[in-house]
C-alpha cells in the first residue's frame, strides 16, 4: 500500500531582512513626507516646523516600540483595532477601528486638495473646483480599472524622490551660505523667542504626526520577515528615526530659506515656493511635479484602502452588505465603495476648503488635523494595549514594559488635545455617530459588530 503523502499548504516565504523592512517603511511613508504639510506646520507652529517634527518623532518612537511589541503577540494581524479589542475591550477596539475608518476616508480627500492646489501652480487659469473634479475622476477611474502600483514601481519613485531631495539640499546650501545672515539665524528654526509658545508648538506637533503616518504598516509584514520578533520592532523604530531626521533636515533648510511663516503665496504648497526662492523657476517646477506625483500615488492608494475597509465592514454586516459588501464580478474590486469614497472625497474637498477659508485655516490643514484625530486615538490605543499585555498581565516586568507605552500614550494624548477645535469637533462627531450605531447594532455591544480584517488576496 502506497504511503500517504502529506502536502503542506503554501506559506509566505520569510525573505525580508531588517533593512528590507526599513526600506519598505520609508517607501510607504515617502521621503518627501514633510514637504506637503510644511506650510500648515509653519503657520500652526508659528515658525517652529522643525521643532514640531522632532517632538513628533519622540512620540512616534515610543509608539513604534509598542507597535513592534504588539506585532510579536499578533504576528498576522498588525492592526491597532485588533490589539485594542483583544487586550482591552472589544467596544474600545471598535472605537479605534471606527476612528481609523475616518483616517482612511480623509486621506484621499486631503490628497485631492493638495493635488488640486499643486496643479494650479502649473495652470493657474483652471479653477480649484475643476482640478478637484479631475483628480476625483483620475483616482476613481484608475482604481475601478484595478490599476495598482507594484513594489518595484514604488521603490523607483522613492529613489527619484531621493534624487530631488538631494538636489534641493544642494541648491539650499548654495542659497543659505551665499549671503551673510543676522545673529540667531541658524538657531531660530528651533526656537524663535518672538513667536515661541508651548500651545502653538504642540498644535503644530499634532499636525506633524502626519509626516510619520504609515510606519505601523511594517507590522503587517510579520509573516514574511526574518526573525519577526526582533526585526519588526527594530525596523519600526529605525524607520521613525530615519524619516524623522530626514524630515527635520528638509524642514530646517526650508526655514532658513524662507523664515517668514505668514507670507507664503499659498500655504498648502508652501514648500514649492521655498524651492523656487532657493533656485528659481526650474526648481519650483521640479519640486511641484515631484510632490504632485507623490500625492497622486498616495491618493490612489488611500482611495483603494478606504474602499477595501468599507468592503470589510460590509461583508461583516456592519454596513449594508448589498452595497458595501459587493464585489465586481469582472475585475474583482469593491466597485461601489470606490465610487462612494471618490464622491465623498470630492464633496469633502469643497466643504473643507470653504470651511477653512471661513475660519482662517487651510482646507488641507483642517483635513490633516481631522485625520490625525483618528490616528492619535489609534496610537494611544496601541500604547495602552502594550502596557496592559506586557506590564499589567506580564509575569516578568521591566522598564521596557512600563516607560515606552505610558510615555507614548501621554504624549499622544497631549498632542490629541492640542488639535484645533474644529478638528476635535468633527472627530468627536464621527466617534459619537459610530458609538450610537454600534450600540444600536449590537444592543449595547453585546455582540460582535465589525471584523475589520480584510479578506486574503486571491489570484
Image (cartoon, helix red, strand yellow):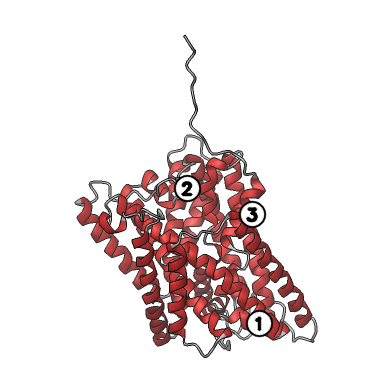
Circle 3: element type: helix
Q: Name the N-terminal-most of marks 2 and 3.
A: 3
Q: Up-down: is 127 above or below 114?
A: below
Tag of residue 266: none
Seen at 71% across and 83% down, the residue is 278
Residue placed under numbered mark 2 in the picture: 78
Rate crowding at label 3 as few (under 14), some (14 to 19) or many (20 or more) other CA atoms within 10 Å.
some
Q: Name the quadrant containing residue 335.
A: bottom left
Left or right, residue 396 beside residue 289 = left
Q: Name the quadrant containing residue 420.
A: bottom left
Rate crowding at label 2 as few (under 14), some (14 to 19) or many (20 or more) other CA atoms within 10 Å.
many
User: How many marks do you count on the picture?
Assistant: 3
Q: Up-down: is 215 above or below 297?
A: above
Q: Nearer the viewer, mark 2 or mark 3?
A: 3
Q: Examine the rendering and report whether any part of residue 418 can be seen.
A: no
Please state the horizontal and vertical placement of residue 162, each as a whole percent of the image.
Answer: 69, 65
Please state the horizontal and vertical placement of residue 322, each as a whole percent of the image.
Answer: 26, 56
Residue placed under numbered mark 3 in the picture: 23
Please state the horizontal and vertical placement of residue 201, each as a whole percent of the image.
Answer: 54, 74
Q: Name the N-terminal-most of marks 2 and 1.
A: 2
Residues under labels 2 and 1: Cα distance? 39 Å
Residue placed under numbered mark 1 in the picture: 284
Residue furthest to the front? 330
Could you say which is closer to the camera, residue 276 or residue 301? 301
Circle 1: element type: helix
Amino acid at each position: 500500500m502506497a504511503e500517504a503523502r502529506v502536502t503542506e499548504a503554501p506559506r509566505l516565504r520569510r525573505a525580508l531582512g531588517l533593512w528590507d523592512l526599513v526600506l519598505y517603511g520609508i517607501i510607504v511613508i515617502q521621503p518627501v513626507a514633510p514637504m506637503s504639510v510644511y506650510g500648515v506646520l509653519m503657520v500652526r507652529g508659528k515658525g517652529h516646523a522643525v521643532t514640531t517634527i522632532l517632538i513628533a518623532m519622540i512620540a512616534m518612537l515610543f509608539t513604534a516600540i509598542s507597535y513592534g511589541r504588539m506585532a510579536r503577540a499578533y504576528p498576522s494581524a498588525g492592526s491597532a483595532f485588533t490589539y485594542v479589542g483583544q487586550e482591552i475591550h472589544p467596544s474600545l477596539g471598535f472605537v479605534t477601528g471606527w476612528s481609523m475608518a475616518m483616517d482612511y476616508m480623509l486621506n484621499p480627500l486631503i490628497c485631492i486638495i493638495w493635488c488640486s492646489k499643486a496643479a494650479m501652480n502649473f495652470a493657474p487659469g483652471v479653477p480649484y473646483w475643476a482640478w478637484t473634479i479631475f483628480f476625483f475622476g483620475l483616482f476613481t477611474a484608475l482604481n475601478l480599472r484595478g490599476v495598482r502600483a507594484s513594489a518595484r514601481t514604488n521603490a523607483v519613485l522613492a529613489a527619484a524622490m531621493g534624487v530631488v531631495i538631494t538636489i534641493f539640499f544642494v541648491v539650499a546650501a548654495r542659497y543659505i551660505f551665499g549671503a551673510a545672515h543676522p545673529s540667531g539665524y541658524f538657531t531660530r528654526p528651533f526656537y524663535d523667542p518672538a513667536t515661541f509658545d508651548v500651545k502653538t508648538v504642540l498644535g503644530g506637533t499634532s499636525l506633524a504626526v502626519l509626516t510619520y503616518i504609515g510606519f505601523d504598516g511594517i507590522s503587517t509584514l510579520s509573516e514574511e520577515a526574518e526573525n519577526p520578533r526582533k526585526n519588526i520592532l527594530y525596523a519600526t523604530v529605525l524607520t521613525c528615526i530615519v524619516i524623522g531626521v530626514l524630515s527635520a533636515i528638509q524642514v530646517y533648510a526650508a526655514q532658513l530659506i524662507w523664515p517668514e511663516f505668514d507670507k507664503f503665496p499659498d500655504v498648502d504648497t508652501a514648500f514649492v515656493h521655498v524651492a523656487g526662492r532657493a533656485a528659481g523657476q526650474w526648481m519650483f517646477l521640479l519640486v511641484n511635479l515631484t510632490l504632485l506625483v507623490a500625492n497622486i500615488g498616495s491618493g490612489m492608494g488611500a482611495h483603494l484602502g478606504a474602499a477595501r475597509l468599507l468592503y470589510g465592514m460590509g461583508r461583516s454586516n456592519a454596513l449594508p452588505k448589498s452595497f458595501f459588501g459587493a464585489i465586481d464580478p469582472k475585475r474583482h474590486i469593491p466597485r461601489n465603495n470606490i465610487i462612494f469614497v471618490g464622491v465623498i472625497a470630492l464633496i469633502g474637498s469643497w466643504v473643507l476648503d470653504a470651511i477653512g477659508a471661513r475660519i482662517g485655516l487651510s482646507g488641507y490643514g483642517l483635513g490633516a488635523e481631522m485625520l490625525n484625530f483618528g490616528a492619535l486615538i489609534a496610537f494611544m490605543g496601541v500604547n495602552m494595549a502594550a502596557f496592559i499585555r506586557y506590564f499589567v498581565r506580564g509575569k516578568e516586568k521591566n522598564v521596557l514594559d512600563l516607560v515606552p507605552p505610558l510615555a507614548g500614550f501621554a504624549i499622544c494624548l497631549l498632542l490629541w488635545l492640542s488639535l484645533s477645535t474644529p478638528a476635535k469637533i468633527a472627530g468627536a462627531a464621527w466617534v459619537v455617530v459610530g458609538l450610537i450605531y454600534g450600540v444600536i447594532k449590537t444592543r449595547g455591544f453585546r455582540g460582535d459588530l465589525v471584523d475589520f480584517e480584510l479578506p486574503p488576496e486571491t489570484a
